[in-house]
Amino acid sequence: MALEQDGNNILLNEHGKLVQIKIPATVDFSSNLREIIWTLLENDTKFSLKWRYRIQLVTDELINNAIEHWSKEGDEILISLKIYDNSNIEITISDTWNWKRKIKSDELLRLVKESRESMVRDPNSNKSIRWRWLAMIVLSWSDSFEYIDNDIWWLTAIITKKFTHECSDEHILWKIDKTNYPTEIKIDATRF
């Protein structure tokens, strides 16, 4: 089940870069992942500083959800970032969904959307911390968001953000130095 805010085809048949990262299901590598994602956004997109922070925060939220809610220690999380030459981006986070409470993707997205609708009507309606970040930040800062069930990795979250003039700023180039990260983080980048 998908949530698309503009109803347009978000990403067309474009060329770009695919970066795949595998990590153990632990928050031990969170700061490394934030740095990798930030560097990729800064290197390979034209998103403004504000939008790079937003995309980094959205990705961090989805990764942390995969670790905290849908995986057991020792599982792997797969993060894929497709960065297109025109700066459109698609981020996919897949996990093994080995958690004790499994929910189908359509039910999970329904709960997120209900929480968002409730909080939009009344910001004080959610008295717990559950669903706040996912419902408000991820849905607000992406052009489309979906959960899908699949057989290889149990649960996959996919967001897309289309680059528009409102997202632009100066482009600063940095390079990723793969030697500075723990060996458990595996990075593979290819052009397509």
Image: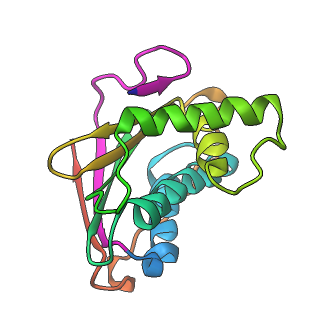
6 is within the stretch colored magenta: yes
Residue 169 visible to an observer of this rendering = no
When the figure is inspected, residue 137 is found, relative to residue 13, above or below; the finding is below
* Front residue of 21 and 43: 21
Q: Quadrant of the N terminus?
A: top left
* Nearest the eye: 119 or 23: 119
Is 186 left or right of 162, judged from the image as shown? left
What residue sits 45% from the left and 69% below the top? 33
Residue 73 in sight: yes
Span of residues in magenta: 2-25
Relative depth, front residue between 102 and 54: 102
Q: Residue at x 66, y 35 (%)?
A: 116
Q: Position of residue 38 (x, y in %)?
A: 52, 61
In depth, the one of 28 and 13 nearer the eye is 28
Q: Is residue 136 magenta?
A: no
Q: Which residue shows up at 54% across the image and 17% down it? A: 6
Quadrant (top left, top right, bottom left, bottom right) of the C terminus: top left
- Which residue occupies 67% across, 51% down? 49
Q: Is residue 136 left or right of residue 62?
A: right
The percent position of residue 40, horizontal first and vertical second, equals: 44, 57
Residue 143 place in picture, x, y as percent: 53, 29
Q: How is the image coloured?
A: rainbow
